């Protein structure tokens, strides 16, 4: 696992963490929500490998979180296809770290 600078993350201020993708029109919109809601650092690479690395770092601390995902089914097909990969990352994260639960609402 990559060792990351914990000081570059912002504190997650909500639990459950609400990811509302219903108004997203671009990948940039998706990644903006991920960055803001998970408190990701400025160097966040805006790709699935980066989100895996950073979420592993966040959830490895063992604090319990619930992540609720809204608007997935309202996304345009190209964004929904990309987000299906994101949902796979979330599934893998929840398998690796039992302290986090992801729910598609």
Image (cartoon, rainbow, N blue to C red):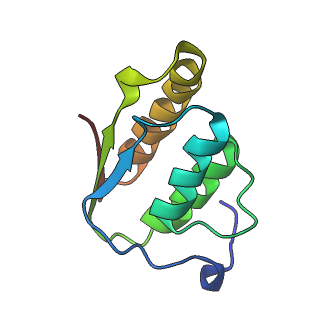
Q: Please, which residue is most extreme toward the bottom here?
A: 7
- Report the residue at 51% width, 38% height from top: 89
Viewed as shown, does residue 42 lie left or right of 97? right
Viewed as shown, does residue 52 lie left or right of 94? right
Q: In the figure, 18 relative to 85: above or below?
A: below
- Image coordinates for residue 55, horizontal then vertical, percent: 52, 57
Residue 26 location, quadrant? top right
Q: Please, which residue is most extreme toward the top here?
A: 77
Q: In the figure, 103 relative to 85: above or below?
A: below
- Report the residue at 69% width, 71% height from top: 3
Closest to the observer, 79 or 55 = 79
- Report the residue at 64% width, 36% height from top: 27
- Image coordinates for residue 63, horizontal then vertical, percent: 31, 71
Closest to the observer, 92 or 18 = 18
- Image coordinates for residue 39, horizontal then vertical, percent: 52, 69
The image quadrant where one finds the C terminus is top left
Q: In the figure, 101 relative to 103: above or below?
A: below
- Image coordinates for residue 58, horizontal then vertical, percent: 49, 67
């Amino acid at each position: 696992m990559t060792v990351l600078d914990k000081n570059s993350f912002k504190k997650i201020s909500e639990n459950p963490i609400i990811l509302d993708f219903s108004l997203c029109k671009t990948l940039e919109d998706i990644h903006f929500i991920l960055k803001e809601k998970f408190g990701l650092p400025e160097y966040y690479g805006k790709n699935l490998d980066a989100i895996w690395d950073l979420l592993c770092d966040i959830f490895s601390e063992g604090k319990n979180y619930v992540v609720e995902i809204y608007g997935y089914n309202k996304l345009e097909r190209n964004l929904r296809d990309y987000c299906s990969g994101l949902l796979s990352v979330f599934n893998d994260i929840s398998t690796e770290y039992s302290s986090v639960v992801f729910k598609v609402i």
